[in-house]
Amino acid sequence: MPIPWRMIGVLLLGFGVFAVAWQFQDWRYGEQLAEQSRLNAETLNQLTLTAATAQQAEQDKRLALEQRLATSEYTHFRAMSDAQRDQDRLRDRLATADVRLSVLLDAGDVAAGCALPAAAGTGGVDHATVRARLDSAHAQRIVAITDSGDRGLIALQACQAYVRALAPEHFE
């Protein structure tokens, strides 16, 4: 039986058309994959930029907070050391009798039998009031108590400033 060349030609032409169609589909599919890959890369780049921007903003906020806290810490340290210096100076002045602490007395108690002089000093702000000087040891104890109170108030202010710096939205 002779080989029909026409049949072979038709078969080869069919395979050729099939191969071209396959190649066309492969090309189209490759193009779609390339486009999808490009879009995914763009999306990933946008997400990376957004994350980097957010991270930089958080770092900037953290740095600003650290600077505010450092300034606040310095301010409160300075207030504490100033209070300590003032208390030390007052204690020294009390110890050398350069300064004397006194208290106002109730005029009714003086009239009831307390024999204290009623003369006002030239530098005093109270005119003709009765005052009693405190013993130096008692004055030192009073100064120590006020020193502790001053330190407590300064420490409380430092704590409040710290909390306000950490969560400012809660105190506005």
Image: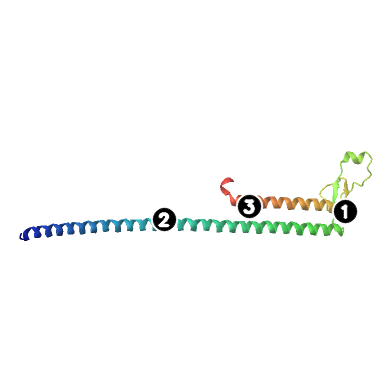
- The label on residue 47 is 2
Q: How is colour applied across the structure in the image?
A: rainbow
Left/right placement of residue 56 relative to residue 151 reads left
Q: Which amino acid does the dot numbered 1 rest on?
A: Ala
Q: Earlier in the sequence, mark 1 or mark 2?
A: 2
Question: In which quadrant of the rendered view does residue 35 lie?
Answer: bottom left
- Furthest residue in direction left, as rendered: 2
- The label on residue 137 is 1
Name the residue that disc number 3 marks.
162
Return the x and y of residue 128 as percentages of the image width and height.
Answer: 86, 46
Question: Which of the pair 147/159 is nearer the observer?
Answer: 159
Left/right placement of residue 28 relative to residue 95 reads left
Dot 3 alpha-carbon crowd within 10 angstroms: few under 14, some 14 to 19, many 20 or more: some
**At 51% from the left edge and 56% from the top edge, which residue is drawn?**
58
| Residue 142 showing in the rendered view | yes
| Residue 122 showing in the rendered view | no
Circle 2 SS class: helix
Question: Which of the pair 22/98 is nearer the observer?
Answer: 22
